[in-house]
Amino acid sequence: ASYWDRDGFCGHEAVGVVLDSRSDRFAIGDTVLSLPSSYFKSHVSKRADWFDEKVHNVLLKTSPVRGAFCEIFTSHELYTYKVKECQPRMLLAQAVATILRALRRLGSVVGKTVVVQGQGQNGLMATRLLSQLCARHIIA
């Protein structure tokens, strides 16, 4: 089956609670932001230029492959981060992470005019973040 055919398919960042852990970094009950096995396996298996065999080979071992839109999924400590305080508004983690990645690629917008095409969920968040990054004019 392809990545898209799997349980929970394309969800790739989720905020949730640790139900079981084999890591010293995470205890049962910790609130975390995590990438599911379906996401990192699809990227690690390509062995891109950042691939480090000693670090990333462990990610290719057998584990259930489910996306973040499942009720329960597996991950690895390399792709899991503790969240100090979780509030309901943090559930937009996937969209915010996507926008932040795009803005990092864009570079500095300080004093520049920028265009945000579309004002759906991501467009609204991008507009707000660009404002906080000191864009001079935002055309939305």
Image (cartoon, rainbow, N blue to C red):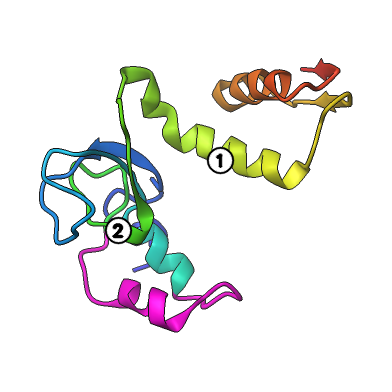
Q: CA distance from mark 2 to mark 1?
A: 21 Å
Within 10 Å of disc 2 (Cα), the crowding (few <14, some 14-19, many 20+) is some
Measuring from the top left, give residue 35's x and y in whole percent.
36, 51
Amino acid type assigned to the residue bearing label 2 in the image: Glu
Q: Residue furthest right?
A: 112
For the point 72% across and 18% down, which residue is it? Answer: 131
The secondary structure type at the circle numbered 1 is helix
Q: Which residue is mark 2?
A: 77
> In this rendering, would 11 be left or right of 16?
right
In the image, taking residue 49 as reference, residue 135 lies left or right, namely right
Split into 4 quadrants, where in the image is the N terminus? bottom left
Front in this rendered view, residue 84 or 40 = 84
Q: Position of residue 13 (x, y in %)?
A: 39, 44
Are there few (<14), some (14-19), or many (20+) residues within 10 Å of tag 1?
some
| Residue type, label 1 | Thr
User: Which quadrant of the structure image shows residue 121?
Assistant: top right
Decide whether residue 61 is among the magenta residues: yes
Image side of residue 54 versus residue 48, left or right: left
Horizontal relation, residue 77 to residue 128: left or right:
left
What is the magenta segment's predominant secondary structure?
A: loop
- Range of residues picked out in magenta: 45-65
Per the image, the residue denoted by label 1 is: 98
Across the whole image, how many numbered discs are drawn on residues? 2
The x and y percentages for residue 139 are 82, 18
